[in-house]
Image (tube, rainbow, N blue to C red):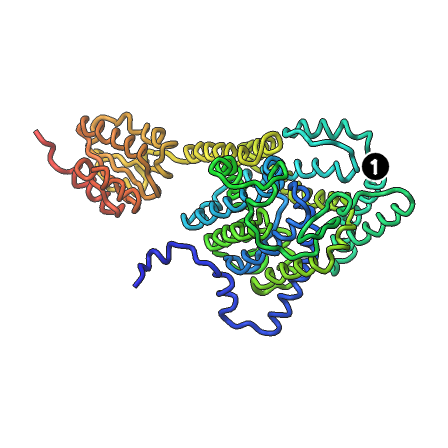
Amino acid sequence: MGNPLVSEALPRPFTALRRALAGGYTAADLRADLVAGAVVGTVAVPLSMALAVASGMAPQYGLYTAVVGGAVIALTGGSRFQVSGPTAAFVVLLAPVAAAHGPAGLLVATLLAGLVLVAFAVAGMGRLIRFVPYPVTLGFTSGIAVVIATLQLRDLLGLTVGPLPETYVGKVAALARALPTMHWGDLLVGVFTLALLVLWPRFSRRLPAPLVALLLATLLAAALAWAGLDAVTLGDRFTWQAGGRSGHGIPPLPPLPALPWTLPGGDGAPLGLSFGLLGELLPAAFAIALLGAIESLLSAVVADGMGGDEHDPDGELLAQGLGNVVAPFFGGFAATGAIARTATNVRAGARTPLAAVFHAVFVLAALIALAPLLGWLPMASLAALLLVVAWNMAEVRHVARIVATSPRSDVLVLVVCAVLTVLFDMTVAVGVGVVLASLLFLRRMAEVSGMELVGEHHPLVAGLPPEVVVYQVAGPLFFGAASKAMGALSTVASGVRVVLLDLSTVPAIDATGLVNLGAAVDRLRRAGVAVVLAGVQPQPHRAFARAGFRGRVAIHRSLERGVEKARVWAEAPAAD
């Protein structure tokens, strides 16, 4: 018989699916999930290709990610409505890996990130990820949005520019120098697509704006080409070879199994696998895993709010890990929960995780049946689509509200994270942001924590002899606040025989708090003053027991019993 504690501690796959199907699955549920899957799939096809291109990969790799990663995560996940696939947040992390190590390097990094996500889930970090402060999350997502939007200017304007520098400032300078090479065909198609993406939802939401905008933009590009004003298309930019066949655009083939490290590396030759390569890719893999964990759990929370459900965070992390482990063996790169596609899924009437599976099936069908047509999509239109994604990702309204209404410390964290993301990368931004937010949080906690002498008219003091003084301690006694709180005990009036500390509002104490309290207790005992700790909560009570406080002070869980002990000690005859 297994250990029940172990089984409860480990994350369980398929939690959302089992919970959704527990009450049965009707024909009406199937119809609703099929419709939702088709709607989300329609949005996912162009978006997945655009995100693959932005990440430095051929467009079909984005579709493979949506098909394999999306299906595996949906089936095994902990969120009822989550839709996973390539997302814009990953672009700034994936593009440098693809540039340095080729498609194979990015797939191997994704595989490593999947293993890290599984480790996160087993360690129970699903609930801990939610403690990343909101200004940190908003700061780095806004910074990523700025970088993504900047990178789309090349295809939107049809600029002729070589490989971009690694730094953001260098990228901006290179794009600025290339402005004289702007191509009017690309600009017209890009602006037309952008206008439709923005304006179409105001007139109708029955047809997804990306479907309408990209279809009409493709027709416009064909008309411009007939007039001698070409716009670059997917077929112009990308070619493929598979099974002795070749072509332009996207291969009309499903994701086929292959070892990720046998694909081309940065030099075009098969990458191979070595410990040195894994060591080079591990930092990027950890960053991908961290961002994937944050992004997927944020998306799951949004889905909960819209669909009235509650996700299993560790189960969702496990599914994200499994999806990112399996996808690279079929050409898929990093996938995570996509907030916009998840919201579309809920609005379209999804009822179970099977809707996200049907979305993956729809993308697969489009890949096989429409591959020749997808090659006609203009690159400028995909750039316009990513510009809209970046705008939504930047959450300008939320940023403005935070800046206008939040404490200056939160604004500082947001701005620092955004700037560091733009100038350096997301890993640096999150690390610095979390540390900065933690330090500011500790300062706030230190401000609200403290110790106050209770006046003689307080109910606690009423009836106590004058030889007893009562102090109320507020807030946790941790390293940021303990010294300040205990400072009130540095001097005690003459004639005091007992000090009563009311700890009923102290939920926790750490080692620094124990040291500071212990020093204050020893100082009072040397002065002939006894100490009573009353109203002690469970965690401090355990800490006092381990630290050996019982022989030095009186400790009472009950405040009333502590007050009575102080009275007895104060009224006892003084020792000669």
Residue 316 % position (x, y): 50, 54
**Position of 416 relative to 130 (above/below):** above
Q: Is residue 291 left or right of residue 43?
A: left
Residue 445 % position (x, y): 42, 36
Q: Is residue 135 left or right of residue 198?
A: left
The three-letter amino acid code for the residue at tag 1 is: His
> Does residue 405 appear in the picture of this structure?
no
Between 107 and 16, the one lying in front of the other is 107
Mark 1 Cα within 10 Å, few/some/many (few <14, many 20+)? some
Q: Going by the picture, which residue comes out furthest to the right? A: 227
**Position of 503 relative to 317 (above/below):** above
Q: Quadrant of residue 89?
A: top right
Residue at 63% across / 67% down in the picture? 32
Q: Going by the picture, which residue comes out furthest to the bottom? A: 27
Classify the position of the C terminus by image quarter. top left
> Does residue 34 appear in the picture of this structure?
yes
Q: Quadrant of residue 70?
A: bottom right
Residue at 82% across / 46% down in the picture? 192
Between 242 and 447, the one lying in front of the other is 242
Classify the position of the N terminus by image quarter. bottom left
**Residue marked by disc 1:** 183
Q: Is residue 436 left or right of residue 547?
A: right
Q: Quadrant of residue 147?
A: top right
Residue at 26% across / 48% down in the picture? 558
Q: Is residue 475 left or right of residue 368?
A: left
Residue 27 % position (x, y): 61, 74
Q: Going by the picture, which residue comes out furthest to the left? A: 576
